[in-house]
Structure formats: C-alpha cells, structure tokens
C-alpha cells in the first residue's frame, strides 16, 4: 500500500477549521482508494509567533524536506505587523523548498453564481501558472534615510533566464497535458503569457523571448498568445472563455488570481498549489485567515478540500483526487446556497461531512 508522509500546517484564523475538514475528506479518500496518509501537524503561524517569537526555523524547514507533501491552512495574524509571518513562514517555505510554481485553477463549479453575468462553468475554466519564487518577491532592495523627507525605498523585480525558463517549461508541459484540446474542450492547447512588454521591457522582454524560443523549439503543438496584464484583467471579466493556460510572473500572478477567484465565486472555493516539480509541494486554499469568521463554523472549507484533492493528484492518486473534485461539484450543484462564509446554508463541519460522505459512496 502506498504511504505518503504529509505535513499539515493549519496556521491561523480559519485555517485550522478548513484544514480539519480537508483532513476529514482526505482520510475517507485514503481508506476508500487504498493508500495511507501519515499526517504530522506543525504549529506554525501567528499563535506560535506570539508565544515564542519563532516563525519558520531553518530546522523545521529542513524537516519539511522529508515529507511527500504539505497541506497549509492560512498564515496571518491581526496583532502582528504585516510581512513578518508572510515572509517568515509562507514565503520562507515557498522559497526554501523551491516551490517555483504556483498553480491556481480558475474554475466555476456547477451551481455557483459568478459575478460575471452570463458566464457559466464552460466560460470560466482556465488555469493560472504563477512564477512563485522570483520577481519583486525576491526582496532585492532596501530603504535609506527612513522616516525622513528624503526617504528612498527600492524593491526590484529580479528574474534570471533560469527562473523564467523552468517556469515556462512547466507551463508548456502543463498546457500540452491539460489544455482545452487535451480535455476535449477546444481545437488547441493554448498557453498565454501575461506580461507588460510595453513598459517592463527588460523583465518581460526576457519572459517574451524565452516564451517564443522555447515554444518554437520544443512546443510547436501548443498555441501561443500574449496579453499585457492590464488587458488580461479586462478579458478575465469580459470574456474569460478565451483563456486556457496562463503563465506570468510572481506579482502579476498574485493579483490576477484574486480577480480570477472572485469570478469563480470567491475565495471560499479557490484552491492552489505551491509546486516544486522535483521536490516537496505545498497545497493551500488561497483565501487567507478570514479573522472575522474565525471559530464560528461559518467559513467555506471547499477551497481547502479542493487543495487536498490537488495534493492527491500531485502524489499520483488521481482517482481519489477526481472523486473529491466530483463530490465538490455535486455539492455546489445540489447543496450549497453560496460559496461565501455564513451563506452556504450549512456550517463548515456540515460541508466537510457532506463531502466526506459523498467520497465514501
Ligand atoms: C497569496 C498571498 C501571499 C502572496 C501573501 C500572503 C504573502 O497573497 O498566496 O496569494 O502574496 O503570495
Ligand atoms: Mn495573493
């Protein structure tokens, strides 16, 4: 029987509540499909930091390298200055484990109302591949004369050909395997680069050249498109059906995936994975800690449950992953009134129970 070592980091806010439901569903799936999940919980995040002053230590990071995958709830705390936990835990894990891909499907599930009038599951069905360890997140820069009228602050976008190329190659492979043609939904598998070649001529010039060189040389079967990021925002709202697989740098990817999430019904249903294709990947709902809903049994656990499904998929447990996905589709089509916290028509635990039950059938 296959056995996977999973590190579980519930984190802060509503993280523990949604992760409890994801774990519930994963256990049912592993029983049913005959594999074992050996889960170890890590107490990381705001609560821990307030108690001990520790974020993610180098020792813990090293330990995490020994797992097959990580399941993360949410990191962030209202009483801690912005940046400390984000950089000290979340980004430290992403960078330290070299999770250079952030995979974020934008998929409208059946029965979910999108704020985009007239757009249904057929129209809102694409994937954003966000470069996840470089760009403006690298932390190159600094501040001088802080607090004076002459203060200068610099934070630079940094990309190497190596970083760009490995991300693009992942994206081309992904488009070839999972694009719309591969899924019987269109004539082409299409990869669109989202950039800003009209202003960020250096950085997106590099992305654009690499995109076309790699595409011409190794992926002639994948159709290529290019959109400026600002225009892409218009199309994500106006005609999301034109998109298949998108690839972009770190900060653009951060921003457009929040836009994508709201078009798919909100953060309650938006799942994601921080992927190191050669190493340890970390799966997390993209929603954050939702402090105002903490402890109320009102938060939507479906994003965490879908992140769990993405984790199983990455481990090669495709049948179990598909079953969870199908069960979520069944629930959104037939049961939940909304994806929003406190508007689902059910509590957090009831939604978890419902999916677990469906998976077991
Ligand atoms: C996300 C989040 C993080 C990011 C923050 C919390 C550092 O917004 O996962 O999208 O910017 O990557
Ligand atoms: Mn974000």
Image: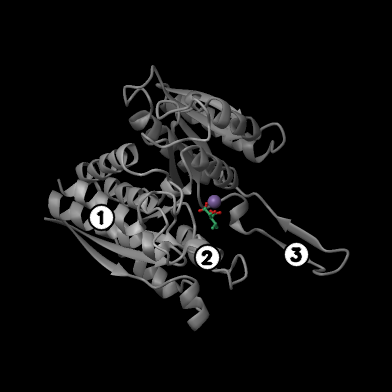
| Circle 3 crowding by C-alpha within 10 Å: few under 14, some 14–19, many from 20 | few
x and y percent of residue 280 in the render? 35, 56
Quadrant of the image for the N terminus?
bottom left
**201 left or right of 272 in image:** right
**117 left or right of 81 in image:** left
Gap in angstroms between the C-alphas marked 1 and 2: 27 Å
Mark 3 or mark 1, whichever is nearer to me: 1
Gap in angstroms between the C-alphas marked 3 and 2: 24 Å
Looking at marks 3 and 1 on the same chain, the residue that comes earlier in the sequence is marked by 3
| Circle 2 crowding by C-alpha within 10 Å: few under 14, some 14–19, many from 20 | many
Looking at marks 3 and 2 on the same chain, the residue that comes earlier in the sequence is marked by 2
Gap in angstroms between the C-alphas marked 3 and 1: 50 Å
Q: Which mark is residue 173?
A: none
Question: Which residue was labeled with disc 1?
Answer: 353
x and y percent of residue 54 in the render? 49, 78
- Does the closest atom of ligand 1 sit within 8 Å of the Cβ of label 2? yes
Residue at horizontal 48 percent and vertical 35 percent from the top? 114
Residue at horizontal 60 percent and vertical 37 percent from the top? 206
Q: Is residue 44 something one can see in this rendering?
A: yes
Question: Which residue was labeled with disc 3?
Answer: 143
Circles 3, 1 touching at the beta carbon (< 8 Å): no
Residue at horizontal 42 percent and vertical 32 percent from the top? 172
Question: Which residue was labeled with disc 2?
Answer: 76
Looking at marks 1 and 2 on the same chain, the residue that comes earlier in the sequence is marked by 2
x and y percent of residue 137 in the render? 59, 54
**17 left or right of 198 in image:** left
| Secondary-structure class at tag 3 | strand
**203 left or right of 108 in image:** right
């Amino acid at each position: 029987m296959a056995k996977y070592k999973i590190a579980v980091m519930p984190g802060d806010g509503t993280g523990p509540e949604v992760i409890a439901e994801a774990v519930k569903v994963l256990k049912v799936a592993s029983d049913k499909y005959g594999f074992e999940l050996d889960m170890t919980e890590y107490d990381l995040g705001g609560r821990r930091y307030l108690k001990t002053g520790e974020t993610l230590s180098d020792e813990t990071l090293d330990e995490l390298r020994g797992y097959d995958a990580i399941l993360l709830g949410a990191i962030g705390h209202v009483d801690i200055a912005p940046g400390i936990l984000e950089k000290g835990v979340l980004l430290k894990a992403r960078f330290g484990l070299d999770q250079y891909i952030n995979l974020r499907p934008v998929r409208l599930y059946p029965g979910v109302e999108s704020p985009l009038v007239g757009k249904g599951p057929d129209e809102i069905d694409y994937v954003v591949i966000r470069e996840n360890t470089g760009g403006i997140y690298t932390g190159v820069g600094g501040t001088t004369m802080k607090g004076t009228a002459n203060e200068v602050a610099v934070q630079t976008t940094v990309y190497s050909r190596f970083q760009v190329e490995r991300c693009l190659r992942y994206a081309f492979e992904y488009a070839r395997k999972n694009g719309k043609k591969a899924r019987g939904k269109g004539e082409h598998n299409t990869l669109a680069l989202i950039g800003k070649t009209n202003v960020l001529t250096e950085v997106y010039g590099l992305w654009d050249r690499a995109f076309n060189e790699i595409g011409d040389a190794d992926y002639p079967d994948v159709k290529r498109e290019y959109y400026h990021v600002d225009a892409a925002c218009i199309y994500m709202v106006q005609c999301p059906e034109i998109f298949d697989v998108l690839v972009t740098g770190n900060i653009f990817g951060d921003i457009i995936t929040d836009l994508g999430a709201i078009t798919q019904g909100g953060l309650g249903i938006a799942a994601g994975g921080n992927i190191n294709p050669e190493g340890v990947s970390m799966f997390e709902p993209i929603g954050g800690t939702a402090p105002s809903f903490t402890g109320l049994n009102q938060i939507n656990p479906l994003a965490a449950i879908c992140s769990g499904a993405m984790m199983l998929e990455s481990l090669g447990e495709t049948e179990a992953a598909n079953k969870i996905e199908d069960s979520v589709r069944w629930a959104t089509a037939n049961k939940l009134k909304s994806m929003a916290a406190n508007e689902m028509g059910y509590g957090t635990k009831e939604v978890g129970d419902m999916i677990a039950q469906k998976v077991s059938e």
